[in-house]
Amino acid sequence: MGDKKELKALNRLNSERIMIEIAKHIEAGVPYIDAVVEYAEKNQLEIEVVGEIIRKSPMLKANIYREAEKLNMIEKLVRLPV
């Protein structure tokens, strides 16, 4: 039942607006992961709901992944040198 409420909230807040709000935190020097968590808490959204928006933004998703690698939260990917 809580999922329906969260989906309504997600529909109310469009993804572009969410990305702009998260970007403001990041520009202020807040790490990507913290910016997303703060946004979810501030707007009383489950992190999974905000995660759906993040999945739609390849750039934000990649930056969060890199940050998680640096913090050893996930296993590092082997990348070819460019």
Image (cartoon, grey):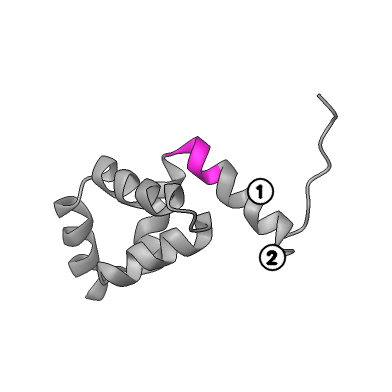
Q: Amino acid at mark 1?
A: Arg
Q: Position of residue 33 (x, y in %)?
A: 52, 60
Callout 1 secondary element: helix
Residue reaching furthest front? 28
Residue segment shown in magenta: 57-61
Residue at the limit of the structure toward the bottom, as seen here: 1
Marks 2/1: CA–CA distance: 10 Å
Snapshot quadrant of residue 5? bottom left
56 up-or-down from 80: above or below: below
Q: Residue at the spot x=34%, y=45% of the render?
A: 19
In the image, residue 4 lies at what x, y percent?
Answer: 20, 66
Horizontally, is 69 left or right of 62 in the view?
right
Kindly identify which residue carries mark 1: 66
What residue would you read off at disc 2?
73
Mark nearer the N terminus (2 vs 1): 1
Q: Amino acid at mark 2?
A: Met
* Mark 2 residue element: loop
> Quick check: 60 left or right of 16?
right
> Which x, y percent locates residue 55?
45, 45
Determine the residue positioned at 34% across, 62% down.
Answer: 39
